[in-house]
Image (cartoon, rainbow, N blue to C red):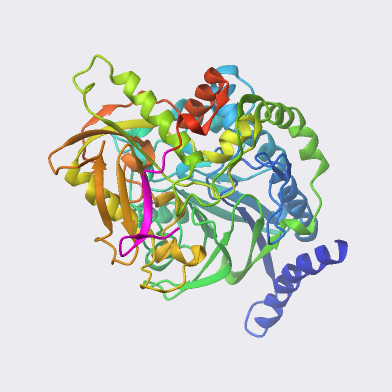
Amino acid sequence: MHSKKLAVVGVATVAALAAPAAASASSPAKTVTVTVMGTSDLHGNTLNWDYFKNAEFTDSRNNDVGLAKVSTLVNQVRAERGADRTLLFDSGDTIQGTPLAYYYAKVEPVHETGKLHPMARAMNAIGYDAVTLGNHEFNYGLPLLATWVKQMKAPVLGANAVHARSGLPAYRPFTIKTMKVRGDKPIRVGVLGLTNPGVAIWDKANVEGRLRFTDLVATAKKWVPVIRGLGADVVVVTAHAGDNGMSSYGGDLPIENASALVAEQVPGVDAVLFGHAHNEVPEKFVTNKVTGEQVLLSEPGKWGQRLSVLDFRLAKKRGKWTVVGKSATLLNTNTVAEDPKIVALMKEQHETTVKYVNTVVAQSKEQLSAAESPYKDTAIVDYIQKVQAETVAEALEGTADASLPVLSIAAPFSRTAVFPAGPVSVRDMAGLYVYDNTLMAVKLTGAQLKEYLEYSAKYFNQIAPGAPVDPAALTNAGGTPDYNYDQLAGVTYDVDVAKPAGQRITGLSHQGRPVTDDQQFVVAVNNYRQSGGGGFPHITTAPVVYNAQVEIRQALIDHAAATGTIDPADFAEVNWRLTRDGVPLF
């Protein structure tokens, strides 16, 4: 363990020391190296712990997670480079993603109890210099977000999150950090924070009419000259946006993954520390189209598995500090032990969460697994469908829509989810329904349902007649994730994977009769899908008949607790199946 640690940290040190040597022939004698460390997409991970498995986190690549590990690496870099020459930034998605984050947002919400949010506690102790808003910061509403922002010692940035009416920044756009240089003028590092425009769709209920999210490139063009004008020698953009220039939400909003576009199109940016895509990008250079300068990009993966380390070498030119060299690398948190200081700080909130997730809510008559749920109708996903449909049907009693059939949409979020035979706990429920979605219901026609299902069925690869059926090669066509394969309960239908996408749905029936084009249905659906996530047809424009902000995971927990028993005989029904030229695949 120890030798591996030295090897990885050593690479960063060699890179940092080699860079000045390479440029020594032309550069002035006196150079100063400034180091920016970066995390992103921490998603509520403070300790190296998997709350769903009730054990230390591990995966097939032996990754570790959490801020306690990050802290150890940060301390090492500060010791190596000098704490007065290092800064620590984060590029967003901080306060959502684990049961720990959920607990202090929904069970004991910090904006109501006044307790310190676990992520504020850990990040304050580590000593972050600036943190940028991610899209998931808005999941729990603006009051909780405001509390966390206030609790953070580091400025929380989001230049392109503006007040809906005035267009003025709703959060701090940037901050400038000053580093003293002995016998010389100080070095000033400016950091501009940019968040994701998709918030307008994904958290519509929380931000509509209150906040707007402007284009990342346009916003950077506005603020970078301001930061330079205030004397910044180095400008880093921390962006909660991937680097492929594409969007997952269609064309009505500014580009989602605009990090490389900012590097390309905005003069005066030295580097972009980015996130959102959960990828590992140690070091990437993009040429700025205006200046011809090389802009450095780095993305540190997710959950505190990596730490980006960006080195900027500065020299005096015409009396000004100027960047004359830059490089970046990633450090792996699995090479170090957790910082005992952070572990001790998190102990109480961690133990509270462990106790909460292990609370038993019901007994299951048999083991239910989600392993085959992407390509078979499984009882465990049917449980989600049952709870969603019942919750909506009860709410519609006595309304004009009470006579309409209630259908339900759910997707296979996790292939590893299991309800064990016997006691089922909160963490079993949370392992099945991993997102903090709320329940909605809309009205769709039979024709719209058919188009919706056709769109969903593009998730499958086309299988030639007679070809062997390999479940692993059947799904995720075109990179479609499991959570974008919607299954519909309350009707029966087949998905013919021998046919091309768009021509796969056959036999769509309701209570034994073919569904007609003009037939009306109420459809229970989560807020992510209804607001446009995944780009499904008709769902965003359909009339909304139910939106009580009920969290689906909590509805599952409440239903299980109320009945005390989970018995597939009460809800399991195979209402869809995969076929090939009309013959069932399984």
Asked if residue 250 can be seen in this view, the reply is no
Asked if residue 475 can be seen in this view, the reply is yes
Q: Please check the rendered image and state whether residue 155 is part of the magenta-colored stretch, yes or no.
A: no
Residue occupying image coordinates x 22% and y 17%: 399
493 or 120: which is nearer to us? Answer: 493
263 or 414: which is nearer to us? Answer: 414
Q: Is residue 321 left or right of residue 142?
A: right
Across and down, in percent, residue 516 comes to 15, 42
71 or 317: which is nearer to us? Answer: 71
Residue occupying image coordinates x 30% and y 48%: 493
Q: Is residue 199 left or right of residue 556?
A: left
Image quadrant of residue 25?
Answer: bottom right
Across and down, in percent, residue 294 comes to 49, 73
Q: Quadrant of the C terminus?
A: bottom left
Q: Please check the rendered image and state whether residue 581 is part of the magenta-colored stretch, yes or no.
A: yes
Q: Which residues are magenta?
A: 573-586
Q: Is residue 77 above or below residue 344?
A: below
Looking at the image, how many numbered discs can be counted on the residues?
0
Q: Quadrant of the N terminus?
A: bottom right
Across and down, in percent, residue 72 comes to 77, 50
Residue positioned most to the bottom: 25
Across and down, in percent, residue 438 comes to 41, 32
Residue positioned most to the right: 2
Residue positioned most to the top: 398
Residue occupying image coordinates x 66% and y 55%: 305
Q: Is residue 209 above or below residue 34?
A: above
Q: Is residue 241 left or right of residue 162?
A: right
Q: Is residue 205 left or right of residue 113?
A: left
555 or 114: which is nearer to us? Answer: 555
Image quadrant of residue 581?
Answer: bottom left
